[in-house]
Image: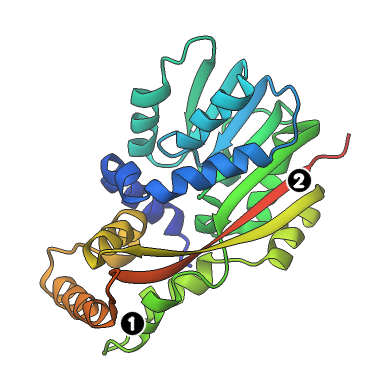
């Protein structure tokens, strides 16, 4: 990835922040399962890294009722959506900070729990990202991660591989972001954390071609480009035509794989 990739990702999510929750509603259930997997305990100070619009924080509040939550995100648009939804939660002090994972404007060893839901796969430097998250935790603090797992969206990748001229940027993005269990374990171990559990969840989903492409626009707009531009629009039309050809009675069928991880900072 280029050196300006983090800025491109942040700008892309700012452009689509208002549409995010509707386009990725399946991720809300994944975030709830992540929160339910966190060991029982008292977590007064929590940091949500790549907090997005706040649905993982909402699940956290529902289960643990922390006293203070700090949300960090490089996208101004996402922070605005978070503030609008969760800024007034009664009994919880909410602080929002603008910044990427490697330069979070938060103190070291300040949090009992760190959560990172559907953001880790966009971090360009994944070992450094894990170390940055680990440094925010108190001794004994827990880190919970949810990100894209290896092997998801293969049907869409097959379409891209057979739509000429091949768009290697789109096709290669999956290899750049998706990760498997051994890789996640290595990131966490190299960050000095004790890995408690890492696992994969694979699901088959059925939707319309239009809904799937809306999801891709919202989460990967920085890769797709402006769909109103002639060349981009023409290519997307060819992709969508192939997807319609491959769709069955239940619509467009695709697999989505989520990777979960729970780790702890040594006491």
Asked if residue 148 lies left or right of residue 38, the reply is left
* Location of residue 214 with respect to 48 vertically, above or below: below
Q: Nearer the N terminus, badge 1 or badge 2?
A: 1
Residue for badge 1: 159
- Residue 98 % position (x, y): 46, 34
Asked if residue 227 lies left or right of residue 173, the reply is left
Q: Looking at the rendered structure, which numbered label has been put on residue 80?
A: none
Residue 11 seen: yes
Q: CA distance from mark 1 to mark 2?
A: 37 Å
Q: How is the image coloured?
A: rainbow
Residue toward you, 26 or 126 = 26
Residue toward you, 38 or 227 = 38
* Location of residue 126 with respect to 67 vertically, above or below: below
* Location of residue 67 with respect to 41 vertically, above or below: above
- Residue 237 % position (x, y): 16, 75
Residue toward you, 189 or 255 = 255
Q: Looking at the rendered structure, which numbered label has been put on residue 263?
A: 2
- Look at 69% across and 34% down and name the residue there: 136
Query: Residue 115, located in which quarter of the rendered image?
Result: top right
- Residue 12 % position (x, y): 32, 52
């Amino acid at each position: 990835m280029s050196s300006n990739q983090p800025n491109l990702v942040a700008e892309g999510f700012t452009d689509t922040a208002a549409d995010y929750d509707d386009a990725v509603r399946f991720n809300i259930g994944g975030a709830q399962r992540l929160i339910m997997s966190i060991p029982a305990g008292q977590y007064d100070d929590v940091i949500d890294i790549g907090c997005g619009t706040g649905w993982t924080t909402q699940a956290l509040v529902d289960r643990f009722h922390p006293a203070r939550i700090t949300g960090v995100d490089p996208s101004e648009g996402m922070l605005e959506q978070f503030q609008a939804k969760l800024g007034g939660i009664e009994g919880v002090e909410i602080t929002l900070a603008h910044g990427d994972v490697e330069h979070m404007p938060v103190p070291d060893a300040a949090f009992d729990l760190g959560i990172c839901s559907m953001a880790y796969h966009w971090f360009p430097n994944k070992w450094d990202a894990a170390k940055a998250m680990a440094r925010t935790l108190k001794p004994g603090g827990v880190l919970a991660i949810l990100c894209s797992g290896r092997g998801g969206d293969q049907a869409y990748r097959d379409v891209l591989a057979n739509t000429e001229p091949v768009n290697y940027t789109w096709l290669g993005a999956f290899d750049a972001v998706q990760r498997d269990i051994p890789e996640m374990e290595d990131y966490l171990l190299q960050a000095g954390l004790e890995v408690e559990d890492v696992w994969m969840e694979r699901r088959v989903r059925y939707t319309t071609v239009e809904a799937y492409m809306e999801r891709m626009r919202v989460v990967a707009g920085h890769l797709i480009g402006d769909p109103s531009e002639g060349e981009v629009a023409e290519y997307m039309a060819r992709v969508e035509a192939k997807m319609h050809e491959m769709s069955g009675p239940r619509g467009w069928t695709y697999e989505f794989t989520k990777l979960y991880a729970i780790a702890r900072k040594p006491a």
